[in-house]
Image: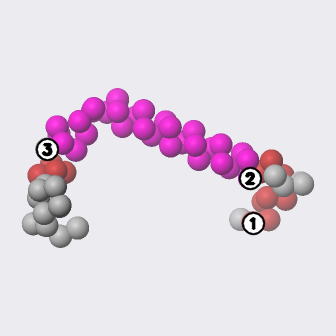
Amino acid sequence: MPIGWTSPDGVKASLHHITDPTVFMPHGVTGFLAGFQIAIFSFTGIELLGTMNRRDPRSAEDFT
């Protein structure tokens, strides 16, 4: 996104949104860790489903 671009609702793009701690992570490290936990849990579930759908889960090593 180019610096100086203005969105339709009037918010101007700038580095201020990355450097200001109240804008970049408004819920702090706790909010980041909560979102990270959800993402890791989701990806792990998808990997487990993919492994369970194979006839021989040990043969999944052939794909690496």
The earlier-in-sequence mark between 3 and 2 is 3
Q: Residue at x 27, y 32 (%)?
A: 27
Element under label 1?
helix
Q: Are marks 3 and 2 in contact (CB under 8 Å)?
A: no
> Is residue 14 at least partly visible in the picture?
no
Most foreground residue, 2 or 56: 2
Q: Residues within 10 Å of mark 2 (few under 14, many from 20)?
A: few
- How would you classify the magenta stretch by its main secondary structure? helix
Q: Identity of the amino acid at label 1? A: Phe
Residue designated by label 3: 20
The earlier-in-sequence mark between 1 and 2 is 2
Q: Residues within 10 Å of mark 3 (few under 14, many from 20)?
A: few
Single out the mark in the foreground, 1 or 2.
2
Which quadrant of the rendered structure holds the C terminus?
Answer: bottom right
Most foreground residue, 51 or 59: 51
> Image check: 23 left or right of 32?
left
Point out the stretch of residues depicted in magenta: 21-50
Q: Residue at x 23, y 67 (%)?
A: 1
Q: What is the spatial separation of the Cα atoms under label 3 and label 2, in whole angstroms?
A: 41 Å
Whole-percent x, y for residue 4 in the image: 9, 66
Residue designated by label 2: 50
